[in-house]
Image (cartoon, rainbow, N blue to C red):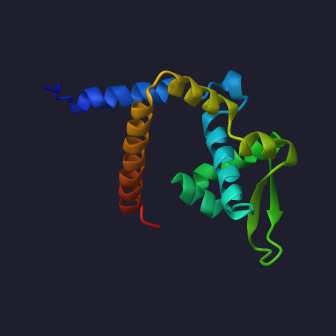
Amino acid sequence: MQEEISIEQLMEVIQRFIHNNRPRHKETMMRPSELMVMMTIAKYFKRHNSGIVPSQLSDELNLSRSAITPILNELENKGMIRREFDTNDRRKTIIVLTENHFAMMSEGCGFYRNTIDALIENLEPAEIASLYSVLTKANKILADYNSKENPE
């Protein structure tokens, strides 16, 4: 018979997982918010073969434009991204990764890859499949919830 898990226990284990899997500034040379923005830009480029406009980036990360702007400013100051004008609509600004950071980000951030590899090494194939299934379902539920809570 399986022990019932309280909401407090579940919240604690999720918080601990997030804490253990967060990037450390020393390892990435970027703050976690900067890293998430960089990973999102790289992922968007892989899917669409183009840069992303700030409003799309806000939507992808579920953050306001005012929260995204200072992160983009810092990444631009560090030389990691570049703002370009859309050739079809000069009112639009497109965010692209600079050439020297594109390869690093499109291959996946090393920190996250290393932590996921360490996790997978210690799980059985059935556990990996269960984790994938549960996280996929959780991501869909949370995305649906967030879109209802924050309609644009």
- Looking at the rendered image, the quarter that the N terminus falls into is top left
- The answer to whether residue 74 is visible is no
Give the left or right position of residue 2, taking residue 51 as reference.
left
Q: Position of residue 79 (x, y in %)?
A: 84, 43
Give the left or right position of residue 96, taking residue 8 as reference.
right
Give the left or right position of residue 107, taking residue 116 as reference.
right
| Residue shown at the point (77%, 39%) measured from the top left | 104
Q: Is residue 16 above or below residue 67?
A: above
Q: Is residue 5 above or below residue 146?
A: above
| Residue shown at the point (43%, 27%) measured from the top left | 124
Q: Position of residue 93 (x, y in %)?
A: 75, 65
Q: Is residue 148 above or below residue 11?
A: below
Residue 32 is drawn in which quadrant? top right
- The answer to whether residue 148 is visible is yes
Q: Is residue 67 above or below residue 47?
A: above
| Residue shown at the point (52%, 28%) measured from the top left | 120
Q: Position of residue 76 (x, y in %)?
A: 79, 46
Give the left or right position of residue 20, taking residue 138 as reference.
right
> How many marks on residues?
0
Q: 52 and 102: which one is in front?
A: 102
Q: 99 and 133: which one is in front?
A: 133
Q: Position of residue 97 (x, y in %)?
A: 78, 50
Residue 151 is drawn in which quadrant? bottom left
| Residue shown at the point (79%, 71%) measured from the top left | 86
- Name, please, the residue furthest toward the front: 125
- Name, please, the residue furthest toward the right: 99
